[in-house]
Image (cartoon, grey):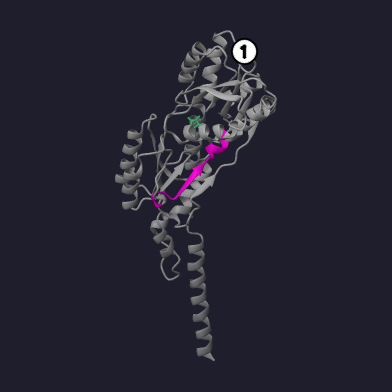
Amino acid sequence: MKTGKTMGLLLASAMLLFSVACSNTEKAPANASKPEATKESTSATKAPAATPADKKITLGFSQVGAESGWRTANTKSVQDSAKEAGFDLKFSDAQQKQENQIKAIRTFIQQKVDVISFSPVVESGWDTVLKEAKDAGIPVILTDRAVDSKDTSLYQTFIGSDFVEEGRRAGKWLVDTKKDAKEPVNIVELQGTTGSAPANDRKAGFEEVIKSNANLKVIASQTGDFTRAKGKEVMQAFLKAHKDIDVLYAHNDDMALGAIQAIEAAGLKPGKDIIIISIDGVKDGFVAASEGKINFIVECNPLLGPQLMQAVRDVVAGKQLPKRIVTKEGVFTSEDAKRELPNRQY
Ligand code: AHR
């Protein structure tokens, strides 16, 4: 009898110990620094004391620059979300130069960060540095812009907009608006940074759609580098060279806003004498649209921070991510912009 009781007590204590150990592993923070560490902490027999799973995640992020309102909103989203997630964020601004981004990525590798993320200023020329990160065992997450690397094992996932679709949406609105046009419609295009994914894709998507109407003709197309100053400068040149511009298609709001200054300085009415289509949907773009100076805006969402931090957590926890995570976006006419303006966050 006595032996039975002792055995029972022993069994009960063993079960208690086991359940404490298990509940400790269940509470292990999601921000485990390495997949191996997560596996280790699931062993019920090990003490749950300071394992690598408790380590703060270090994220190295190389940003394109500060060229537009979109970019400012994107930077804030990344910084705020990293803080909220409790990550140690190493942030580097590349000032629109690929060599600065490559340098920053190499520094992150030397610093042995847990994850590297970047928004590539241009599409090509990343294979070598991405291979260096892979060899160092540091996962890479692309945000906002894509790379053209054939070897997709060089990065975990790409989170961002479908830029081709954005170009198509811009083109579709113009095709619908000008469906009854009997005369040629002269379009000028302000492209984003040369060689960047959004410039390449927005151009391609737009062209794909407008070719359905032979009256729609792009008579001039040049880069405005996604900045207001360049948008204004190039639009001035377009206005000098062409007296018969009907439509401006700008790859972002900032260039459209710069172009509006040039159009007004030339004594013309933006939105009336020249129809304006742009991409992004930042607050200043919405203000211009609600005043009727921009006719149509295709949204490009800069608030990628929360999705990025979740992806970082997942990668660190050893989860396989889909190779492509597309952000949801809408489109806005001047009337929509008027309604939406008070709710615009950025
Ligand atoms: O990559 C996204 C683009 O970059 C935005 O449309 C533009 O405003 C930014 O500079």
Q: Position of residue 97 (x, y in %)?
A: 36, 31
- Which region shows up in magenta? 153-167
* In this rendering, position of residue 217 left or right of residue 333: left
- For image coordinates 32% across by 44% down, the residue present is 129
Q: Which residue is mark 1?
A: 269
Quadrant location of residue 282? Answer: top right
Left or right of 256 in this view: 47: left
Please name whichever residue, 93 or 289, is drawn nearer the observer in this view of the structure: 289
Residue 51 lies in magenta, yes or no? no
**Where's residue 332, x and y in %?**
65, 30
- The answer to whether 345 appears left or right of 152 in the picture is right
User: In this rendering, is residue 300 above or below 113?
Assistant: above
* Label 1 environment density (alpha carbons within 10 Å; few <14, some 14–19, many ≥20): some
| Quadrant occupied by the N terminus | bottom right
Type of residue at label 1? Lys
> Disc count in the image?
1
Q: Write down the quadrant of residue 116 in the picture.
A: top left
Q: Position of residue 253 (x, y in %)?
A: 54, 25
Residue 282 visible to an observer of this rendering: no
Residue 318 visible in rendering: yes
Q: Is residue 184 above or below residue 100?
A: above
Quadrant location of the C terminus in the rendered image: top right
Whether the magenta-drawn stretch holds residue 159 is answered as: yes
Residue at image point 47% right, 56% down: 320
Question: 341 or 258, which is in the foreground?
Answer: 258
Q: Nearer the viewer, residue 108 or 267?
A: 267
Q: Which residue is drawn at the image coordinates 49% and 72% (left, top)?
A: 18
* Residue 165 percent across, percent down from the top left: 57, 38
For residue 26, side relative to residue 275 (left or right): left
